[in-house]
Amino acid sequence: MRWVRASLLLAALMVVGVIPGWARIAQGESASGGARTPEATAAAQANSTTKAEATPKTETTEYQLSPERYAKAIAYSRAGYSVYFASVLWGIVALALLLKTKTVAKLRDFAEGQSKNFCLQAVLFVVPLSLLLGVLELPIRIYWHHLSLRYEQSIQGWSSWIWDWTKGELLEAGLGILIAMLLVAMIRWKPRTWWLCFWAAAAPLSAFLVFVSPWVIDPMFHAFRPLGETHPELVQAIGKLTAHAGVPVPADKMFLMEASKKTNQLNAYVTGFGASKRVVVWDTMISNSNRDELLAVVGHELGHYALGHVVKGFAYGVIGSFFGLCVAYLALQWILKRWGASWDVHGQGDWAAVAVLLLIANLTSFVSEPIGNGISRRQEHAADVYSLEVIHGIVPDGAEAAAHSFQVMGEHDLADPNPPALIKFWLYSHPPLGDRVSFAHNYDPWSKGEEPKYVK
């Protein structure tokens, strides 16, 4: 998402806040369909209860797939890697071509020719630029949704997908206007230290967006309901976990996301902070897991909640953005000195320079991807440890419940059983499923007389 990438450069806007939910949504991994009926909800509850009672005792020691599922997982995941790199490359090339052909300069001339008003110029420049970039990226996005339908990861119809794409583009354009106005104003005000001033201004803006996202942005793409409305027994079980951990999570902070209208994938997550912080469980996760597996998954999300990962991730991003903006300032001076005249960009305070900064943001976010994902993997592993500890003594065989929950998610999501080392380093925000299954099966400090790390 182009303006999100700009925000990542400028204030590391979405490390674990707005975008974990928004990106999944706007990228099309969610969906269409009518409201879930009481009959469908009851059927899902019955299915979950039946599984809880009927699931045989097994030993999930490693992540395994049937030969057919294995082939699909390899094909789907490797296609995803290719699409990601192609998307990044095309985003950079598209911006470079728009600058080289002076299309960006013409958009600037149009905006300035229509009005002398600073705010209106921002709208007239950013909106067509954002929509043009969106249209140029659309073929790759369409191809990825086609693959998701082909491999039965998405069930979202094309009309619903196009509507979600449209909403995402409008949101990006709106965010882009705000970023561009703030950026150009800072550059014109403080030509030498604009990057530092912008960093100070963008951080609270980013925090505000993370705060309001669960209330404003997420519901634009999915329906959310209090978890207690449909699964009061799960809320009660989660309450026992939070009491055991000494980290109270009120029932009104637990939500069900009706993901089954758009996707077959399974997930749960924590988002927001302060009054907007919440634990969200996808209905697909509930329908395909038994009670103990669900508690293991929720325990993982409670780990994010208890260990403060949203706030910590945001703080890491803001710190990183300080250095990112410094690099952006230096890179902008060098690029404008070398190509500014041929691109008809008049200086760093020119509206057209926003597109140059967006190009720098794309390059910077790609190069820094391993850093953010490395931090995320550590947090996700910590949440796995927390989950195993918090369900210990509550779930009869917590290790098996956790290991099998990963197995179930991998089977449904076609998780790569053997991702290449470079891909793990560059793209994986979570440890690979095989590593998580193995860790869950083997983590047992209690039998070794050792003290648990988080839940004493």
Image: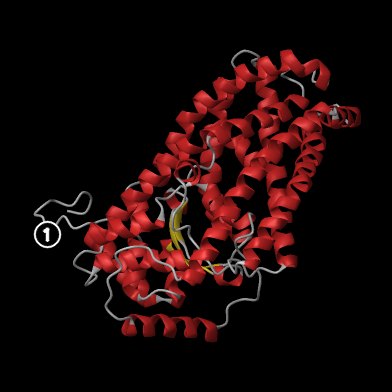
The coloring applied to the image is: secondary structure
Q: Quadrant of residue 136?
A: top right
Residue under circle 1? 447
SS category of the residue bearing label 1: loop
Say how many tags the image has: 1
Q: Is residue 339 left or right of residue 265?
A: right
Q: Position of residue 332 (x, y in %)?
A: 66, 20
Q: Position of residue 363 (x, y in %)?
A: 62, 31
Residue shown at 61% from the left, 16% from the top: 330
* Res 70 seen here: yes
Q: Quadrant of the N terminus?
A: top right
Q: Is residue 235 left or right of residue 429?
A: left
Around disc 1, counting alpha carbons within 10 Å, would you say few (fewer than 14), some (14 to 19), or many (20 or more)?
few
* Res 240 seen here: no
Q: Is residue 276 left or right of residue 147?
A: left
Q: Position of residue 92 (x, y in %)?
A: 69, 35
Identified by mark 1, the residue type is Ser
